[in-house]
Image (cartoon, rainbow, N blue to C red):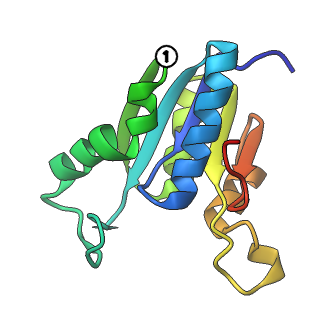
Amino acid sequence: MSAPRRIVVGVDGSEDSQRALTWAVALAEDSRSEIIAVHALGLLTRLGDTAAVPSTGHRGEVEARLEQEWCRPLARADVAHRSLVIDGEPVHALLSTAHDEAADLVVVGRRGAGGSPGLLIGSTSQQVVHQADCPVVVVPPEWSNR
């Protein structure tokens, strides 16, 4: 596989998505790729450590957090990047963005919060792996940028 030109990364403010973004930044710095950070805005959203609130009326706050907090590694990196807030559920947001942007790679974090062996990589990660038209990297919780 040649170096990716465009990488789509799922970003939601979680530690898992931060590891995925850090992994993608390291790859993009080496390969001179563009990163497109995608946040899916569903019916509910988490704003920091608060309980989930209805997304309606909070889009601006989510966009600000995406750019100023959740994508902080992109601001420090020497890579081309954009951030997008897409309405809908995460799998559709990631796959439609990857398709529309002709992405060469999708990167997601692995929650692994479920107790079922079939869901060890998380349902969103698993669905993206099975439905994507391009390669997918799932960054595990154990990975750290050494």
**As rendered, which of 85 and 26 lies closer to the eye?**
26
Specify whether residue 128 is in view. Answer: yes
Residue 25 shown left or right of residue 13 in the figure: right
Rendering quarter of residue 43: bottom left
Q: Can you identify the residue that label 1 sits on?
A: 78
Name the side, left or right, on which 74 lies relative to 123. left
- Quadrant of residue 104 within the rendered picture: top right
| Residue at point 47%, 60% (across, down) | 14
The count of marks equals: 1
For residue 3, above or below residue 76:
above
**Disc 1 residue type (three-letter):** Asp
Q: Where 35 falls versus 94 (above or below)?
A: above
Q: In this view, does 28 lie above or below 65?
A: above
Locate the C terminus and report the quarter of the image it occupies: top right
The residue that appears at 73% across and 66% down in the rendered structure is 121
Q: Report if residue 82 is visible in the image.
A: no
Q: Within 10 angstroms of label 1, few (less than 14), some, or many (20 or more) residues?
A: few
